[in-house]
Image: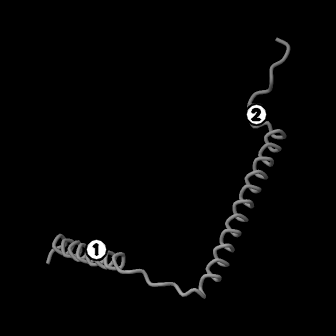
Amino acid sequence: MGGAARAAVRRGEAEVNRAEREAAVRRVMAARPVPVPPELYPEAVRRGERLLRRGRLVRRVLWVLVCVAAVVFGVWAAYAHPWVEPPSGTTPPVDGW
């Protein structure tokens, strides 16, 4: 069997596998949802609140880091003057022509 034939077989297997996976997903989606035990509700709420708090903390820390980076950049730019052309190192400045 040549390389092209092997690739075609692999593609065919992938297509069958994909069709089987899609069929399995359709069966799961069509099935009646399993009832969630009521004793799991408080734990789910606690975990959800913890995730929300953690996400809020991460966003705040990232905003603080962005602000600190902006201030550091501003201080560096004010001190280093990166917009000014550096003096030439090959010829001395000519004064008094």
In the displayed structure, 52 sits above or below 32; it is: above
Q: Is residue 89 above or below residue 65?
A: above
Residue 6 x/y as whole percent: 19, 75
Q: Nearer the viewer, residue 13 or 85?
A: 13
Q: Is residue 54 left or right of residue 1?
A: right
Identity, as a three-letter code, of the amino acid under mark 1:
Arg
Residue density around tag 1, few if under 14, some if 14–19, many if 20 or more, within 10 Å: few
Query: At 79% from the left edge and 52% from the top edge, which residue is drawn?
Result: 68
Q: Secondary structure at mark 1?
A: helix
Please tell me the numbered disc located at residue 18.
1
Q: Is residue 72 left or right of residue 20?
A: right
Q: Is residue 33 left or right of residue 20?
A: right
Give the quarter of the figure containing the N terminus.
Answer: bottom left
Res 78 label: none
The residue beneath circle 2 is 86
Name the residue: 44% across, 84% down. Answer: 34
Q: Nearer the viewer, residue 91 or 83?
A: 83
Looking at this view, name the residue that lies furthest to the top.
97
- Indicate left or right for 91 with 38 as reference: right
Cα gap from disc 1 to disc 2, whole angstroms: 62 Å
